[in-house]
Image (spheres, rainbow, N blue to C red):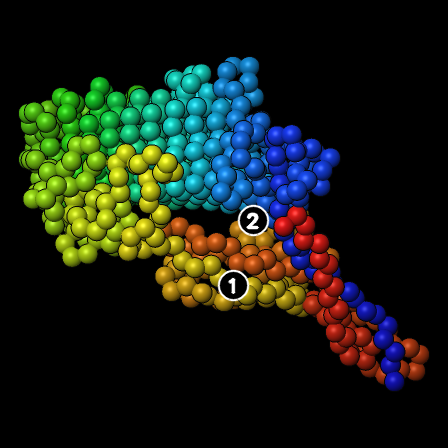
Amino acid sequence: MFKHALLLVAFAGMLQAADIYVDAGAAGNDANPGTIGSPKKTIGGAHTAAAAGDTIVLRGGTHAGNVTISKNNITLRSHSGEWAIVSIGNGASDPAQCIWITGSGSTLSRLEVSGGSYYCIKYEGTDNHVVEDCRVHDSGRDCFKITPQSDYITIRRCEIYNSGIRDSSNAEGIDNVNGDHMHVHDCYIHNIATNGVYPKGGARNAIIERNLIMNCGTGGIYLGFSTDSVWMNQAGDNNPSYYENIDGTVRNNIIINTAQAGIGFCSALNAKVYNNTLINVASTSQSAIHFHPRDGDNGQNPPCTGLDVRNNLVYVASSRPFMTVRVGTGGYHTLAAGGLAMNYNRYHRASGSVTFNNDQTGQSGITLANWRTLMGTDANSTEGATGVNLSTGHLNSGSACIGTAVTISGFSDDFDGNTRSGAWDIGADQTGGTALAVPPTAGTVGTGGSGGGGGTGPTAPASPGSLTATAQAGLQCALAWADNSNNEDGFRLERREGTGSWLTVTTLPADSGSYTDTGLTDGASYTYRVCAYNAQGDSGWSNQASTIAFVTAPVSPPAGGGGSGGGGGGGCVAATGGTLLPVLLLTVFRRRRNR
């Protein structure tokens, strides 16, 4: 009879999250434990005490800004029924940002964030963040700054306004430099010194939808801008041509009152621009929809390629052209041959005819008919009164835009979150259903829409659940989860090693429920999570599941014993005689605190 020669204990930690309360008033003290009855004084004090997964709960009132969130999976929110303000000055001598996020997986919820010499909120090379139901305003320059490699950031149902208080020359609502998979939806963005939103510098797969953008000193939305090349091909970007924007989507936005373009393209690849309403755009320069090349510092200035622009309503009150195709410095082109597909758009000037410019061919002031011939596009687009309410962006009854758009796959809602049924309307508004107030009523954060939930339109998928992680032979981990949605386009699986940053392992097709992760490190601990996604955005995360990868070692039997030691494997240990001993999993719980 063989004796057990080895028992390996695999440690899988599962931590219960805690709420840590902060009261900037007399009740707060950073020496306190952070309970609701004995709160911390500062956000920094709470962050020091926090662990990954914890929530910092701010009591109502004003809290000092200049906050750094460096830990992963931290939520910062107002206490239920209260409204917390995080604020710092926006002068030249004030801190660079009000909130600086360097850890992964943060959530900012139901907060007012103001100030910062440069930015209200800055993301520094980290992934998987959510900002929801917040007011973000009065920045020294940009309200949001997203730096390279800061991916999967969702900004939803927020009000973003008054950028550029210190320096209005370069002060966007949302400035995204090479951050992939940004999703901005149901936000009210207004009184912006320069551009409302732009994903540039090689940013991929941005979705900008159902936003109300008003009163911008430059443009409304740009897919790309001119970015220094040093920021454009970071590790893993694979953008050798230096496209400014790749696979961006802009749909169902209402854009009112911009000095320059309502929507602009700069060295954009495969952009999709559908069902937007542009009113009083290009009041002083550029054009309503504007095409220009990257004026790069490295000579890489690719033309826009694969643009799809359909079902947009464009009303211009100025004498500016509706489209301008610029030529870059040195004569390089803005548009690749056949790179623009436009159709089913409606154009109207308040007084006078619609005109188009193409600097590549040296033609300006041309008519819609000549534009069709010149560009080979816009065959079903029309010119004439739009029947749009110029204050709200919604269509009046009898509008020529009603029922005259083309159906587009991939989405079926409108600006209000109502379903586009039957014949589609041109522009962001589909007549029928409940219309959102424009501008939003007092007290509303964002547009008042909820990502489709406010109407009958599509929504993000439900969160997957019951995630398990089982170590297997050969330094592998078998993942399995419950698919709780029926409208996902796919799943994104992430892991982190120890307490490190979350990294994407893979994306999987719809209806997936399992995956085997390979190439793990002997003795390393891993935690996994999975979410579903579709065109409306990401679901919440599943539960987290943890395991330790290891390789078993052969053990010699006692003298006189028979059999042989087991070979290398993972997830269980080979005992003498080839008998497999069960792995004892120890789960350590951190006491739930401060609920």
Task: Name the residue: 29% across, 29% down.
Answer: 214
Within 10 angstroms of label 2, few (less than 14), some, or many (20 or more) residues? some
Q: 282 left or right of 33?
A: left
Q: Residue at x 81, y 69 (%)?
A: 7
Q: Residue at x 67, y 68 (%)?
A: 473
Residue beneath label 1, please?
A: 465
Tell me which label, 1 or 2, sits earlier in the chain.
1
Residue 4 image label = none
Amino acid type at image mark 1: Gly
- Residue 163 higher or lower than 198, as above or below: above
Residue 295 visible in image: no
Rounded to the nearest angstrom, the CA distance separating label 1 from label 2 is 19 Å
Q: Quadrant of residue 341?
A: top left
**Residue 571 visible somewhere in the drawing:** yes
Going by the image, does 95 lie left or right of 155? Answer: right
Asked which quadrant contains residue 270, the reply is top left
Q: Which residue is mark 2?
A: 503
What's under tag 2, amino acid-wise? Leu
The answer to whether 534 is drawn above or below residue 170 in the figure is below
Quarter of the image where one finds residue 358: top left
**Residue at far top of view:** 92
The front one of 386 and 311 is 386
Percent x, y of residue 577:
81, 80
Mark in the foreground, 1 or 2 = 1
Residue 88 screen position, x and y as percent:
53, 23
Quadrant of image for the N terminus? bottom right
Q: Is residue 269 left or right of residue 129?
A: left
Residue found 19% across the figure and 48% down from its top: 430
Q: Is residue 253 left or right of residue 156?
A: left
Residue 452 horizontal/vertical position (percent):
32, 51
Looking at the rendered structure, the secondary structure element under dot 1 is: strand
Compared with 72, 14 (above or below) is below
